Image (cartoon, rainbow, N blue to C red):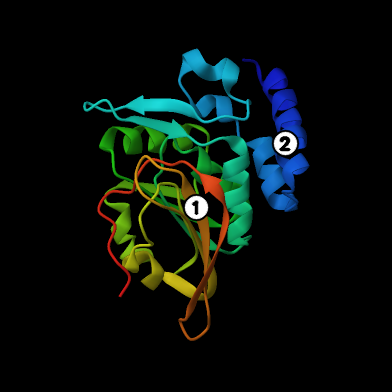
């Protein structure tokens, strides 16, 4: 896919799939128009890159399929964080690196954790080729967060859990937000937005129904 065609498809994607469904943050919309989604998926699926659908990106040795989220979900989760220039964000579930790239267009620094070593390595190489120097990826258990870089101005979890892991709540700054799909593996989940008050109290609300691969070994809130 040549870049002129890809740019046109991204503009159409943002207009028809994202703006039309209520996403209005100008930085998020600009990021979605900029990041070349077709370069984050396998060659054989690139003709579907700008459709309003998730796509498979990886199959592990046990046959579990990892996916790249549909563009609208990526935009909605990014907007829900209410982050911008100067902010530092933690992402759990790097996948192909697409969500990290979108975040990197909006914030100053992205830290991203991916459980699967092969995916983490590929995502890091891909982001380096595309000159995203403000993204750092490491392989590990995302439920534990990234304590050395905490606290964060926002946390985006791109995999589902029965409840939000306690370590992630602890690593979120006061007056900041965490977005995570909550529910049982293999079932419809709720995309849940958590807000942390100045005194550490938590409030949440559900944004929409979603499907995500499970987060491994989530811990329980204290």
**Residue at the spot x=56%, y=57% of the render?**
108
Q: Which residue is mark 1?
A: 190
Which one is in front, 147 or 161? 161
Label 2 crowd bin: few (<14), some (14–19), many (20+), radius 10 Å: many
Q: Nearer the viewer, mark 1 or mark 2?
A: 1
Residue 129: horizontal and vertical position, in percent?
Answer: 48, 32
Work out which residue is located at the far bottom of the displayed protein and give it: 199
Q: Which residue is mark 2?
A: 14
Label 1 crowd bin: few (<14), some (14–19), many (20+), radius 10 Å: many
The local secondary structure at tag 1 comes to: strand
Relative height, residue 135 to residue 121 (above, below): below
Q: Is residue 150 left or right of residue 194?
A: left
Q: Quadrant of residue 167?
A: bottom left
The answer to which of marks 1 and 2 sits earlier in the sequence is 2
Residue 165: horizontal and vertical position, in percent?
Answer: 34, 63
**Residue at the spot x=53%, y=80% of the render?**
197
Relative height, residue 144 to residue 136 (above, below): below
**Residue at the spot x=48%, y=25% of the render?**
41
Which one is in front, 38 or 125? 38
Q: Which quadrant does the N terminus fall into?
A: top right
């Amino acid at each position: 896919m040549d870049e002129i065609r890809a740019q046109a498809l991204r503009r159409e994607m943002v207009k028809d799939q994202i703006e039309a469904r209520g996403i209005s943050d100008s930085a998020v919309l600009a990021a979605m128009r900029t990041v070349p989604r077709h370069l984050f998926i396998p060659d054989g699926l690139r003709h579907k890159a700008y459709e309003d659908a998730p796509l498979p990106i990886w199959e592990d040795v046990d046959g579990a399929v990892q996916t790249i989220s549909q563009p609208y979900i990526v935009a909605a989760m990014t907007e829900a964080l209410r982050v911008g220039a100067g902010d530092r964000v933690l992402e759990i579930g790097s996948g192909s690196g697409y969500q990290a790239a979108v975040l990197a267009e909006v914030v100053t620094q992205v830290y991203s954790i991916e459980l699967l070593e092969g995916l983490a390595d590929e995502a890091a190489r891909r982001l380096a080729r595309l000159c995203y120097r403000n993204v750092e990826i490491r392989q590990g258990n995302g439920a534990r967060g990234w304590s050395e870089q905490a606290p964060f101005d926002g946390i985006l979890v791109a995999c589902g859990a029965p409840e939000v892991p306690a370590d992630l709540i602890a690593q979120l700054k006061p007056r900041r937000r965490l977005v995570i799909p909550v529910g049982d593996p293999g079932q419809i989940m709720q995309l849940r937005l958590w807000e942390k008050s100045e005194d550490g109290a938590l409030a949440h609300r559900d944004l929409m129904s979603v499907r995500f691969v499970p987060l491994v070994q989530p811990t329980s809130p204290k």
